[in-house]
Image (cartoon, rainbow, N blue to C red):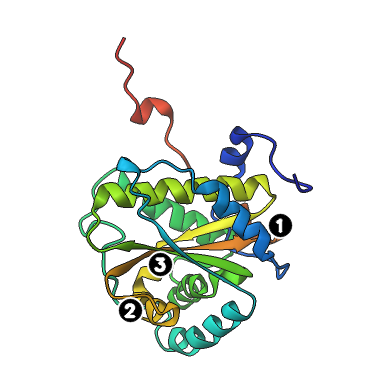
Amino acid sequence: MSPGSSRSVTDAIRTRHSCRAFTAQPVEEPVLRQLLETARYAPSGGNLQPWIVHVLLGESMKAFRATMAPKVAVAPLGGSAEYNVYPANLGEPYRTRRFQVGEDLYAKIGVARGDKAGRIRQFSRNYDFFGAPAAMFFLVDRQMGPPQWADIGMLLQSLMLLAREQGLDTCPQEAWASWHGEVTTFLGTPPELMLFCGLAVGHGAESAPINELRSRRAYVEEFATFHR
C-alpha cells in the first residue's frame, strides 16, 4: 500500500471525490493494469461483463491532447452527445442538487454566477482530463441496455475505490459523450461500440481550491425506507 493510501473500503468511499485538478506526477502502466486486474471482479448481470476499456497514458495521452486541443478551443462545451447525461426536464429534488453542486464548485474557484466565460473555461478543462496524466475510456456494445450500463457503473466504482487504496484520485467524466465521434475515431473502435464516459486518473493537487469541494449528500432518512 502506497504512502497516503486508504486502509479500508470505508476510507476509500469517504475520501473519494471527483478530482478536478491533478499534478503532473505520472501513473505507471503496471499500476493502471493492476487496478483493472482487480476491478474486473465487479459484478454484472448474467456475467456479461459488458465493459470495454481503453487506457491512455504517456505518448498516447500526448497525442490525444494534441488532437483535442484545437477542437476544444473552437467548441469548449463540446458537440452533441449520443445520449442525454441528464433528463431534459429534470424535476425536484434532482434539479436543486445539480444546481447546488455547480454553485458550490464555482464558488471554490471564485467564478461568479454571471461570469459565463469563466464557467465555460472551467467546464472545458474536462477535455484536458483536468491535467491528469492518465485516463480511461469506457465503451459499451450498442446492443446493451440500461442494466448493462449499471454494470459498467459498478466497474467504475470499483476502479475509483481501488485507486484511492493506491493513494490516487479520479474523476468520472460523462462530459466526454459530447466528443464521442472524436474519441472513438482516435481509439479506432468499431461503430457497434458506443462511448459511455471517461475517467481521469492521477495524483490530486492538494493545494488546488477546487479539490476542496465535497458535494452535499442527502441523509439516509431522505432516500431510504426501513420496513420493520
Residue at x 72% of width, y 59% of height: 207
Quarter of the picture containing the C terminus is top left
Q: Tell me, yes or no, whether the two marked residues, 2 and 1, touch with CB atoms within 8 Å.
A: no
Could you say where residue 94 lies in the image, as x and y percent from the top left? Answer: 31, 47
Element at label 1? loop
In 3D space, how far apart are the residues under numbered discs 3 and 1 (Cα atoms)?
23 Å
Residue 132 image-quadrant placement = bottom right
The residue most toward the top is 228
Which amino acid, mark 1? Glu
Please tell me whether mark 2 or mark 1 is closer to you in this view: 2
In 3D space, how far apart are the residues under numbered discs 2 and 1 (Cα atoms)?
32 Å
Up/down of 25 relative to 156, above or below: below
Quarter of the picture containing the N terminus is top right
In 3D space, how far apart are the residues under numbered discs 2 and 3 (Cα atoms)?
10 Å
Q: Residue 79 carries which label?
A: 2
Q: Residue 206 carries which label?
A: 1
Element at label 2? loop
Up/down of 98 relative to 1, above or below: below
Which amino acid, mark 3? Ala
Could you say where residue 223 lies in the image, as x and y percent from the top left? Answer: 34, 31
Residue 204 shows in this picture: no
Residue at x 54% of width, y 75% of height: 128
- Residue pointed to by mark 3: 175
The foreground one among 192 and 219 is 192
Residue 73 shows in this picture: yes
Please tell me whether mark 3 or mark 1 is closer to you in this view: 3
